Amino acid sequence: MIVAVGVLLAGGCGVGRGELEGRTVDGQVDPAFAGTTPVVTAPPALRTVPPTSTTGSPSATTPQTSAPSAGDVEPSLTETRFELVPVAEIEAPVALAARPGTGQRYVATLTGQVWLLDPADGPHAGGGADAGAAAQLVADVGSRVSQGCENGLLGIAFSPDGDQLYLSYTDTARNSRIALMPMDGETPQAGRRRVLLALDQPACNHNGGDVAFGPDGNLWIGFGDGGGADDVFGQGQDRSTLLATMARIDPNPASGQGYGIPAGNPFPSGDAPEVWAYGARNPWRFSFDRLTGDLWIADVGQNRIEEIHVLPAADGWLPGANLGWPLFEGNERFSGSETPPDLVFPVYTYTHDDGCSVTGGYVYRGSAIAALQGAYVFGDYCTGDLWGLVRDPDGTAERIDLGVSVPRNSLVSFGEDADGELYALSAAGTVSRLEPAAP
């Protein structure tokens, strides 16, 4: 299982040609969607402004006015000691989502299971949870999910009202699916699973797979470039496909069928109106800062550079932002010679001297660790180390080693609970909460 997740983040395999497949259920047209097309809907309180252009030197970065600043973080952060407190032992955990209005935490596994960490009673998962924590298997879609390479159940997110659980996974044909399961009490109804969006994958790697609801109430999805290496399928700068993009859809259009295209999407008349930003290689975890609304995207590099982008809420999340792949890997030229005017360079990069595959996390907004307030917590899959990223008002960033880690080749994801506290998920089978170390 660890080998499979290792490939999940950094490997490559397979060939083929991917294209948007449409609204299907397990390869068949869903009768509910027959003859329908996505409708344009207006999201609540969405502010959109033209993206700030970045031209010239690749060392330039788009101004990021709403990102956390060093003044938001206690100066004692570098002296603060941390620990990872085990919450549960679950085989192959890959994503954690908090259910709004309940305080409950749900964990998805790569093999297609969904566990509830907060049932009223129940056994400890694997017998290794900390005191008072329990885990209960509440849904299993493993028979619908492909395994191996970078395939599996890759992400989960709850609707803002907590009534539906959304899934991102690769089906048995190794193609990407975005589906929902209605909730009945604490239990997702796997038998009522409905596929909203289907995307053919030309290879088995670089699926992306993260999903999250934004402050605008819409569902955001990250897709990789289709796999292989060197953007072999030519998807990175192609806005007619959902591959290599951040997509944004309205999963509950007024028609009650399919999904809608929110007003403000930058390419409403294009072949893929779902696209919000493009030029991603493999966005392995993205999140919204629960205070500022800023969108943080960790994009896995290829040969030598890992990168983190920020799309500020104050700038309408820079609709139409070009994240650069394959023209750039990080801030360095990778191919071609052009520098498009919509290019948004990363706010932070690191080379493979420090790791091999970035695992994106969250801006910390909890209350248990005052010194960490406003820092972006992330890490590297290969080293297993957890880091905090602190940004100065001028946009420069400093990475601080938090002094805690999970086993090497296992840091697959982070999670955030209802209180803003953070969790690290290890492919070795542990879900742990980040806490200040006891004196």
Image (cartoon, grey):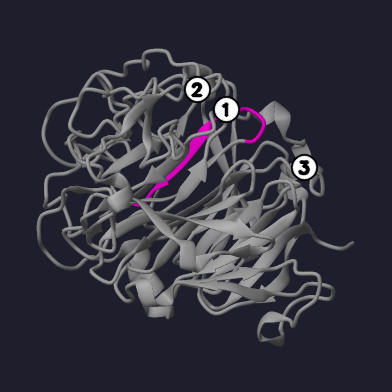
10 Å crowding of disc 3: few (<14), some (14-19), many (20+):
some
Tell me, yes or no, whether the two marked residues, 1 and 3, touch with CB atoms within 8 Å. Answer: no
Residue highlighted by disc 2: 64
Which residues lie in the magenta part? 290-300
The residue located at (56%, 51%) in the rendering is: 164
The answer for how far apart the CA atoms under marks 2 and 3 are is 22 Å
Select label 1 or label 3 by which is in front: 1
| Mark found first going from the N terminus, 1 or 3 | 1
Q: In this view, does 286 lie to the left or right of 303?
A: right
Residue highlighted by disc 1: 67
In this view, 351 is above or below 57: below
Tell me, yes or no, whether the two marked residues, 1 and 2, touch with CB atoms within 8 Å. Answer: yes
Q: Is residue 22 left or right of residue 166?
A: left
In this view, 92 is above or below 198: below
Q: Which mark is residue 371?
A: 3
Q: Nearer the viewer, residue 327 or 4?
A: 4
The quadrant of the rendering that contains the N terminus is bottom left
- Look at label 1 and name its amino acid: Ala
Secondary structure of residue under mark 1: loop
